[in-house]
Image (spheres, rainbow, N blue to C red):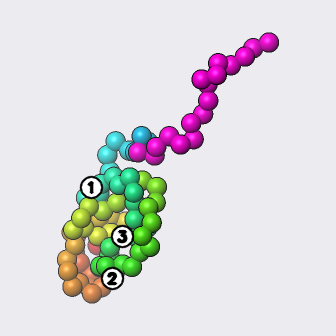
Amino acid sequence: MLHLAESTHFDSSWPVRNCKPFSCPVNEEWRDCAVPCERSCASPAPLCPDICQSGKCQCKDDYFRRNGMCVPYVPGCNGVPIQGPGG
């Protein structure tokens, strides 16, 4: 009969930050406490619930998400298309 050592166990509380990617895409950074919504041209100051989501890459400050990429933020764009990566 085999017995496993007492110290053998699975730790389900292992922090997500230990699993973060080695690098995020251009103009993004890893955030352990991710926000549920990001800024965009159409919504430069979105109303988001004050909750912490699992860690992930998100746009750096002064950037907003456009077509899946983070591009420089331009105040007052009001939905007008902005030239640059992805658009």
The amino acid beneath tag 2 is Ala
The residue at 34%/81% (across/down) is: 43
From where the camera sits, is residue 8 visible?
yes
Residue 43 drawn above or below residue 25: below
In this rendering, the label closer to the viewer, 3 or 1: 3
The residue at 35%/55% (across/down) is: 31
Main secondary structure type of the part rendered in magenta: loop
Per the image, label 2 sits on a secondary structure element best described as: loop
The amino acid beneath tag 1 is Val
The image quarter containing residue 50 is bottom left
Highlighted range, magenta: 1-17
Badge 1: few (under 14), some or many (20 or more) residues near its Cα, within 10 Å? few
Can residue 15 be found in the magenta stretch?
yes
From where the camera sits, is residue 86 visible?
no
Q: Earlier in the sequence, mark 3 or mark 1?
A: 1
| Quarter of the image that includes the C terminus | bottom left
Residue 67, horizontal then vertical, whole percent: 36, 70
The residue at 80%/12% (across/down) is: 1
The amino acid beneath tag 3 is Glu
User: Residue 26 shows which numbered tag?
Assistant: 1
Give the residue number, with chain letter if any, for mark 3: 38
